[in-house]
Amino acid sequence: MSIDATTVGIDAAEESDPFSSISELIGTRETHLNAPAARVRPDAVQEALSTLKSEAGYDHLACVTAQEYENRYESIYHLRSFDDPTREVGLVVPADKDDPVSESAEPVFRTADWHEREAYDLVGIRYDDHPDLRRILLPETWQGHPLSMGYDRDRPQIVALSENEPLEPGSSTATGTETMLLNIGPHHPATHGVLHLQVTLDGEDVVGVEPDIGYIHRCEEQMAQSGTYRHQIMPYPDRWDWGGGGLLNEWAYARVAEDLADIRVPEYAQVIRTMAAECSRILSHMLAMGAYALDVIGDFTATFMYAIQERERVQDVLEDLTGQRLMFNYFRLGGVAWDLPEPRGEFFSTVRAFLDGLPRRLEEYRDLLTRNEILQVRTVDTGVLPPEVAKEYGCTGPVLRGSGVDYDLRRDDPYGYYDELDWDVVTEGGCDNYSRLLVRMREVEESAKIVEQCVDVLEDWPEGERNVQANVPRTLRPDDDAEIYRAVEAAKGELGIYVRADGTDTPARFKIRGPSFSNLQALPEMAEGESIPDLIASLGSLDTIMGEVDR
């Protein structure tokens, strides 16, 4: 369901020209394949963004892409509306090649903090008025910017430890002599991966939290830029979210590449994709629920193992379908790799047997988790994230819907077969850790409804019309300088990809917008002023996967 301009209070003139409110600031206009774009001066960023946000309704800064050309640097602010994400624009900000400086967007969109730090760290653009322009993925002692064109890979990148400025307790997050700096992670099970939290404590009260990321260095964007559109990129998305969301990630790349190359996916393949993607969502949410029980109430023998058992049932289905249990690599540009396994009736029976038993087993999860008094004490009214704050940080997925914001790209920016099916977007208004848990549990039920309807459709599909792939050229070479940003509703939120083509069969720029990156940035808002156990519960409620944070 898309929301028209009158619903969100946008007049007709503004809708026909989304940049009418900032026309005096625009230099030139561009056409990106997903949305109109406009160039503004580096010193007009805040004015332009503030006007687009307050007057035109573009209140969601989804992503910031930084890149370098032969004659300039460039930042692209990908803007959408939370009320209707099909209303989107791009704000392009060129910067001088010799002195790449641009005004920071952080005073307008809080989420720009981390995005611009990453742009500075990897590409080398500096942002005036940024509150904390430090490296974010690489250590402060790193030499150069790895995604810049002049980066020297042969020079030493790390200076001697003795030259590194020492960190004084409390200096990174708070001042005062009564505070203590506590390091949590990066190799602690409660951090859900290699995440380091610098926590400043006053007694047992958290007065400051600074997430320290960048311990994995996946280089996924660089590997994608080295691969061909047609064959070599698709295996990578599974590895961004190894918790089970791989097929959803594959769909993100499929969507952006198919729109870039104008590929139309057969309807039959869309149904298979939708069914497989929702099985993948169940995989991810089951791991999140089981791990959360382990985080909050130390329940390994019951809830965690129950959740793993549930995942095994879904993995059996996906193994039959894709041949894999974790890194599926099943989607292809134009469809899927192959049809449903034979005998089809046996496959459908396996799926239905899982779906028939799921309601009873979910009732057990409610007894073990949401009706557990200890878990309720630990999660109700802790980790509170008000809806407007969640939007400011660009939170999406269950984190945003747990704050009562009704935003889901499957419905609001339809793709696949979702708009043909009967299902509901799940929201909870408590804005706390408990609400985020409830959203994931209820979303499992909605995913099961979607899978069941897909099975009904597939069972009745005529045998002669089961087309699993479009006719895609062996080599794809999108037009030079074609640009596009597309996103899907992955298990953890909005997973977006920006691609700029250069006329060859590999991308010139491939930027990944991982939902965990923006969700994790909101952790200090949720944890400061609470206790250490509340911090662990808040972090677990984000369901962070570090593979899509440090890409």
Image (tube, rainbow, N blue to C red):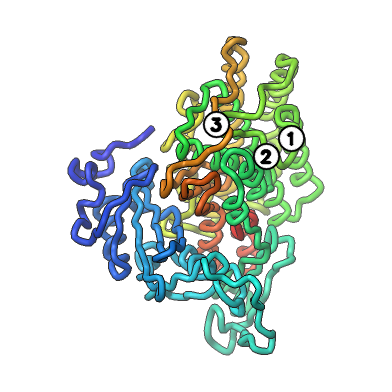
Disc 3 marks a residue whose amino acid type is Pro
**How far apart are the two marked residues, 1 and 2, measured between alpha carbons?**
8 Å
> Which callout, 3 or 1, points to the residue nearer the camera?
3
Mark nearer the viewer, 3 or 2: 3
Residue drawn at (73%, 53%), measured in percent from left and top?
294
The residue under label 2 is 283
| Alpha carbon separation for disc pair 3 and 2 | 33 Å
Three-letter residue code for mark 1: Gln
Screen quadrant of the C terminus: bottom right
Q: Is residue 406 left or right of residue 442?
A: left
**Along the line of sight, the residue nearer the viewer: 329 or 54:** 329
Tell me which residue sits at (32%, 51%) in the image: 37
The quarter holding residue 305 reads top right
In the picture of the structure, the residue carrying the numbered disc 3 is 473
Which residue position is annotated with label 1?
315
Q: Secondary structure at mark 2?
A: helix
Q: Residue 120: where, in percent of width, then height?
A: 49, 70
Residue 298, x across and y down, in percent = 75, 55
Nearer-the-camera pick, 467 or 5: 467
Residue in view at x 56 percent, y 21 percent: 268
Q: Earlier in the sequence, mark 3 or mark 1?
A: 1
Residue 371 visible from this viewpoint: no
Residue 3 image label: none
In-image side of 414 versus 372 (left or right): left
Find numbered disc 1 in the image and state the secondary structure of the residue it sits on: helix
Is mark 3 in CB contact (under 8 Å) with mark 1?
Answer: no
Question: Badge 3, how many Cα within 10 Å: few under 14, some, many 20+?
Answer: few
CB within 8 Å, label 1 to label 2: yes
Quick one: label 1 or label 2, which is nearer the N terminus?
Answer: 2
Question: Crowding at label 2, few (<14), some or many (≥20) Cα neighbours within 10 Å?
Answer: many
Up/down of 217 relative to 454, above or below = below
Q: Amino acid at mark 2?
A: Leu
